[in-house]
Image: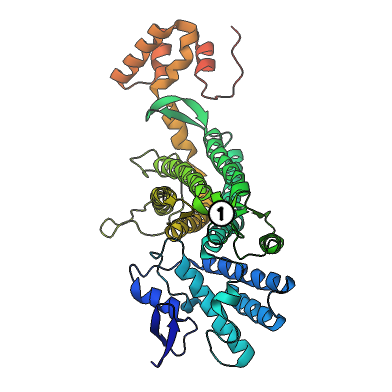
């Protein structure tokens, strides 16, 4: 590989001749090869979007010449379209402001812009990465802006639609199972009857509330730090720059992005990201509840609960022929665990706001965007490969109710708690059903007893 030498404020660095990135990016990549983990594509594309609209606005403000503005905007559009992905080489674990990633973008766009204008890959002439691409900006306002932009667009474009479909499918199952009566369980013990549809309605409501929580974060994530430059004061930025760029971002995305109410808060704190992660963690907890219930309800097929059937997707054992595991619910549980772990990292990163700047933005961005992406993909697979094709095992549901000792609860208003408890103990000791014991002891008339022990949880109140 051929190299060229480039000068920057830290001295000379050797840069691969055919690479678009320049001296500062190369220095960062060489000095901090900690994990090999790069910032996600949605972050890079969001950063390129900011640079594109910044170049256009700086031309409108008569701060950039038209050819320079157009070349930067074209280069940024190419990055947004997915080109030059291999040129963004800076590790997630870098300077806490994300300066290395900001300069990586500035240098790629400057070099590509110069190639557009001159046919040569020059990093600084005629377009300079700092003077032109980064005009009116600082890493300290651009990188927080990129975080909010990438997170909110990912939530709107991927996660909320995935949750909406899951919610709709769970509502359909609520309807499909409305007449399937089964035993309820509390403390992992038999309780009183309910319908399988009622059980699924609880899952649907959990997902609905999760969506509402996510929608509630839009206003805070929608505030963008752009315009604050180094410390929030806006030094070296045109007073109209941020507002104009943000309006273009809002028009392009269809999301109501606004300039930060207070730029000092917007750069010093990452509270909105911490809040968003908390919402994602809550959704992960909800999905854990749902996935766990699904795999327990489907346990068996002969020695478990077996009240529902889930799709069989792959052989479940390398040694036990015919065994089928709840693969998708288990995958969902692992996704949820990862999201909960990410939330801890984001919380700790949020504490790293020292004076006028938070210095954990790259790791916050990595974990927050991973959580959004994992939840969206996990929910899509959970819905399509599991929830959609769940069916009820009506025979098992009916059999479990009839042998449940909790059926005695319906007798309490008629014979009292103590007598009902005695019947339950006799049923347990003998292995007989509550109905059989109650009829044998003639505690009530047979007709009334059958009315009381009818397991339909929606039946009207008995009038004696």
Mark 1 lies on a secondary structure that is helix
Asked if one can make out residue 70 in the rendered structure from this viewpoint, the answer is yes
Q: Position of residue 450 (x, y in %)?
A: 51, 17
Point 43% across, 31% down: residue: 399
Dot 1 surroundings within 10 Å: few (below 14), some, or many (20 or more)? many
Left or right: where does residue 444 sit relative to residue 112?
Answer: left
Q: Quadrant of the N terminus?
A: bottom left
The residue nearer to you, when weighing 163 against 254, is 254
Position above or below: 457 against 358: above
Q: How has the structure been colored for display?
A: rainbow
Residue ID at (52%, 21%): 454
Depth order, front residue of 427/373: 373
Q: In the rendered view, tell whether residue 172 sits above or below residue 50.
A: above
Measured along the vertical axis of the image, is residue 29 above or below residue 67?
A: above
Q: How far from the left and from the top, in percent, is residue 212?
A: 60, 42
Q: Residue 222 appears at what percent x and percent y? A: 62, 52
For the residue pair 325 and 261, the one nearer the viewer reads as 261
User: Which residue shows up at 43% across the image and 51% down it?
Assistant: 354
Residue positioned most to the left: 319
Q: Is residue 255 left or right of residue 458?
A: right
Residue 59 picture quarter: bottom right
- Identify the residue at image location x=37%, y=45%: 301
Would residue 444 be seen by someone viewing this image from the given angle? no
Residue identified by numbered label 1 = 159
396 up-or-down from 381: above or below = above
Residue 119 horizontal/vertical position (percent): 59, 93
């Amino acid at each position: 590989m051929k190299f060229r030498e480039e000068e920057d404020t830290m001295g000379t660095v050797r840069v691969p001749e055919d690479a678009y990135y320049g001296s500062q990016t190369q220095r960062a990549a060489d000095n901090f090869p900690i994990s090999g983990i790069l910032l996600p594509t949605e972050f890079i594309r969001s950063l390129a979007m900011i640079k594109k609209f910044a170049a256009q606005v700086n031309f409108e403000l008569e701060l950039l010449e038209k050819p320079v503005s157009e070349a930067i905007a074209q280069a940024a559009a190419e990055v947004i379209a997915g080109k030059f992905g291999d040129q963004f080489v800076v590790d997630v674990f870098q300077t806490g402001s994300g300066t290395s990633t900001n300069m990586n973008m500035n240098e790629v766009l400057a070099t590509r812009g110069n190639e557009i204008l001159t046919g040569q890959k020059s990093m600084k002439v005629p377009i300079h990465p700092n003077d032109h691409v980064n005009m009116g900006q600082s890493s300290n306002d651009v990188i927080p802006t990129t975080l909010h932009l990438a997170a909110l667009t990912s939530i709107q474009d991927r996660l909320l639609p995935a949750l909406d479909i899951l919610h709709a499918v769970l509502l359909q199952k609520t309807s499909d199972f409305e007449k399937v009566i089964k035993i309820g369980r509390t403390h992992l013990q038999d309780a009183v009857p309910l319908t399988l549809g009622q059980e699924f309605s609880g899952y649907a409501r959990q997902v609905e509330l999760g969506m509402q929580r996510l929608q509630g974060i839009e206003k805070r994530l929608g505030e963008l730090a752009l315009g604050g430059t180094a410390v929030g004061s806006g030094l070296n930025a045109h007073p109209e720059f941020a507002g104009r760029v943000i309006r273009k971002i809002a028009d392009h995305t269809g999301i109501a992005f606004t300039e930060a109410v207070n730029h000092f808060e917007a750069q010093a704190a990452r509270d909105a990201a911490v809040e968003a992660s908390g919402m994602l963690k809550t959704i992960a907890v909800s999905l854990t509840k749902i996935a766990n219930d699904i795999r327990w309800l489907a346990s068996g097929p002969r020695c478990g609960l077996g009240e529902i059937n889930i799709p069989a997707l792959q052989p479940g054992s390398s040694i036990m022929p015919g065994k089928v595991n709840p693969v998708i619910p288990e995958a969902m549980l692992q996704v949820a665990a990862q999201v909960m772990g990410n939330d801890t990292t984001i919380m700790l990163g949020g504490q790293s706001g020292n004076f006028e700047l938070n210095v954990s933005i790259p790791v916050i961005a990595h974990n927050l965007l991973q959580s959004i992406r994992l939840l969206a993909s996990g929910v899509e697979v959970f819905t399509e490969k599991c929830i959609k094709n769940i069916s009820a095992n009506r025979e098992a549901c009916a059999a479990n109710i009839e042998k449940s000792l909790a059926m005695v609860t319906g007798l309490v208003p008629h014979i009292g708690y103590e007598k009902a408890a005695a019947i339950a103990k006799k049923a347990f000791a003998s292995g007989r059903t509550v109905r059989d014991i109650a009829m044998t002891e003639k505690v009530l008339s047979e007709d009334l007893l059958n009315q009381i022990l009818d397991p339909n949880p929606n039946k009207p109140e008995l009038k004696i």
